[in-house]
Image (spheres, helix red, strand yellow):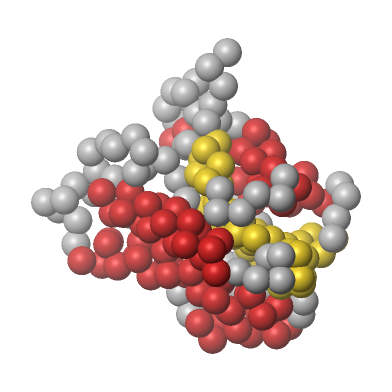
């Protein structure tokens, strides 16, 4: 299987590419480093990427920027970053990518838990991830030729919390998150949101 992995340089992206590279041909795409790069806020950049890569069996996006800040203090630019990058960036990956997705192929986007578990300072992010989930639910109804679309909605990962120097016990390991992307590709579901949450054990 030929898998296009966008956002491969991030913490989750590295875990996902390691997992799939064991059995599949993974094309790793970063934002600014690596052999292949893409700016998901730029439609021309997305189109150029697909023209270079050609047809694929699966597209996984683990990219998407968010901004934290209170409603009172968040500038317009903070909200726009989430809308242009996290939301419309992934929407445009689908819009352009469908032409290059083989029949029976799948697309997996990344949302997040901010809309499910509201916290102060995450209004912009919550708005973006809720939009991704809503888009996936509707897009699944419109795809043809056996093509599928899902999203993985991860809780904050342990490795990120460790980088911040805070307690990571309530986070989920990136390797555990990666298995949800594998489920998205292998299980045959469409329009499904995989909640990647830490184990209660």
Q: Residue furthest top?
A: 201
- Position of residue 191 measured from the top left corner of the image (x, y, whole percent): 55, 54
- Position of residue 11 measured from the top left corner of the image (x, y, whole percent): 60, 46
For the N terminus, give its image quadrant: bottom right
Q: Residue furthest left?
A: 72
Q: Residue furthest right?
A: 23
Q: Nearer the viewer, residue 167 or 180?
A: 180
- Position of residue 80 measured from the top left corner of the image (x, y, whole percent): 30, 67
Residue at image location 41% in from the left, 57% down from the top: 134
Residue at image location 45% in from the left, 45% down from the top: 112
For the C terminus, give its image quadrant: top right
Count of numbered badges drawn on the protein: 0
Residue at image location 23% in from the left, 38% down from the top: 120
Residue at image location 54% in from the left, 63% down from the top: 141
Residue 194 shows in the view? yes
Residue 7 shows in the view? no
80 vs 47, left or right, is left
Vertical placement of residue 101 versus 161, above or below: below
Query: Within the image, what quadrant is residue 58 found in?
Result: bottom right
- Position of residue 18 measured from the top left corner of the image (x, y, whole percent): 77, 47
């Amino acid at each position: 299987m030929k898998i296009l992995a966008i956002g491969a340089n991030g913490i989750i992206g590295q875990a996902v590419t390691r997992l799939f590279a064991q059995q599949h041909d993974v094309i790793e795409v970063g934002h600014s480093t690596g052999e292949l790069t893409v700016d998901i806020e730029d439609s021309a950049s997305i189109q150029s990427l697909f023209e270079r890569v050609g047809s694929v069996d699966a597209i996984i996006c683990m990219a998407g920027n968010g901004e934290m800040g209170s409603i009172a203090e968040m500038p317009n630019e903070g909200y726009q970053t989430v809308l242009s990058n996290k939301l419309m960036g992934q929407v445009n990956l689908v819009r352009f990518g469908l032409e290059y997705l083989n029949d029976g192929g799948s697309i997996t986007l990344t949302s997040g838990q901010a809309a499910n578990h509201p916290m102060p300072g995450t209004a912009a992010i919550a708005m973006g991830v809720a939009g991704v989930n809503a888009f996936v639910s509707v897009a699944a109804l419109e795809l043809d030729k056996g093509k599928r679309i899902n999203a993985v909605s991860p809780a904050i990962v342990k490795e990120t919390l460790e980088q911040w120097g805070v307690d990571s016990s309530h986070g989920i390991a990136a390797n555990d998150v990666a298995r949800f992307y594998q489920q998205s590709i292998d299980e045959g579901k469409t329009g499904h949101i995989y909640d990647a949450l830490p184990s209660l054990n």
